[in-house]
Image (cartoon, rainbow, N blue to C red):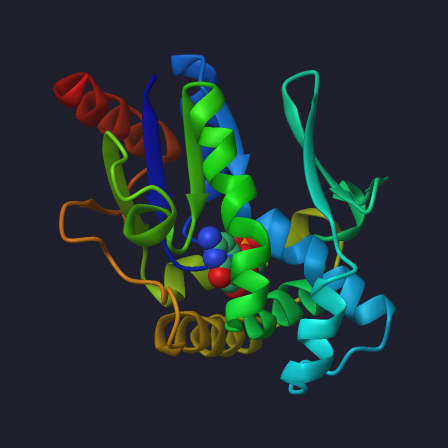
Amino acid sequence: MYSIAIDGPAGAGKSTIAKTIAQRLEFIYVDTGAMYRAMALYFIRNGVDAKDETAINAACEKIHVGIAYEDGTQQVLLNGENVTGLIRTEEVGNMASKTSAYPKVRATLLDLQRDLAKKADILMDGRDIGTHVLPNADLKIYLTASSKVRAKRRYDELIAKGEEADLDQIEQDIIIRDKQDMEREIAPLKQADDAVLVDSSDMTIEEVVSCVVEEFEKVK
Ligand code: DC
């Protein structure tokens, strides 16, 4: 069984790239950010303060995150409820970034993530997959892009959806999120020593996909 870990900052295009590669290689795609987002949704719904670690820890006891697949697409279950359509907001993303710094939050998800990798060929994306979750992954990719490029991609997505967007504000938010994810004590976002660095700033999706598939062919 093979495992591929893709880590990198918010907006680097991990999920788009990961989904395409997983399809091509016939691997199961696991989006770990969605699991942190499901927990964040629980905290928001229940008025748990992101700064109150005791309250967060108590809430973790009441959370069960599960994963299911519908037509090959990952669904995230929060205490049995399919919350996949509710977790892609900025509010949930920010809450996930803040609360994922707590050991108990990370421990709640670690076993689930590792168990998934025992069952099938998987491609897992997140922040700490190559460094912590799957330290023995067959291939580790650190996918990044400049904050300007990441902000512009996000801006274009919002405009395409007919939403309002402020490019500078988006870039500021991305910089804050990077800082939170990289400077936390436990399992911070960083490139694993044995990861291949891919900077997608000047690459198309297809170029990144081909590059990762080529890297996989080398280690297979
Ligand atoms: O990739 P994303 O935007 O869906 O992730 C949301 C947050 O979850 C991210 O800011 C940090 C956290 N996260 C994490 O700490 N570890 C992971 N493996 C994946 C996400």
Q: Is residue 156 visible?
A: no
Does residue 130 appear left or right of residue 70 in this picture? left
Q: Is residue 70 visible?
A: yes
Say which of 194 and 212 sits in front. 194
93 over 79 or under it: above or below? below
Q: Name the spot of residue 114 as percent of width and height, x first.
A: 46, 38
Say which of 29 and 2 sits in front. 2
Say which of 30 and 21 sits in front. 30
Does residue 175 appear left or right of residue 53 in this picture? left
State the count of labels: 0
Residue at (28, 62) in percent of width and height: 190
Does residue 139 appear left or right of residue 24 in this picture? left
Residue at (53, 75) in percent of width and height: 173
Residue at (52, 44) in percent of width and height: 111
Task: Identify the image quadrant of residue 17.
Answer: top left
182 over 207 or under it: above or below? below
Residue at (80, 50) in percent of width and height: 86
Q: Residue furthest bottom?
A: 51
Q: Name the spot of residue 25 as percent of width and height, x first.
A: 38, 14
Quarter holding the C terminus? top left
Quarter holding the N terminus? top left
Task: Identify the image quadrant of residue 61.
Answer: bottom right
Say which of 87 and 65 sits in front. 65
Q: Name the spot of residue 210 as percent of width and height, x first.
A: 27, 24
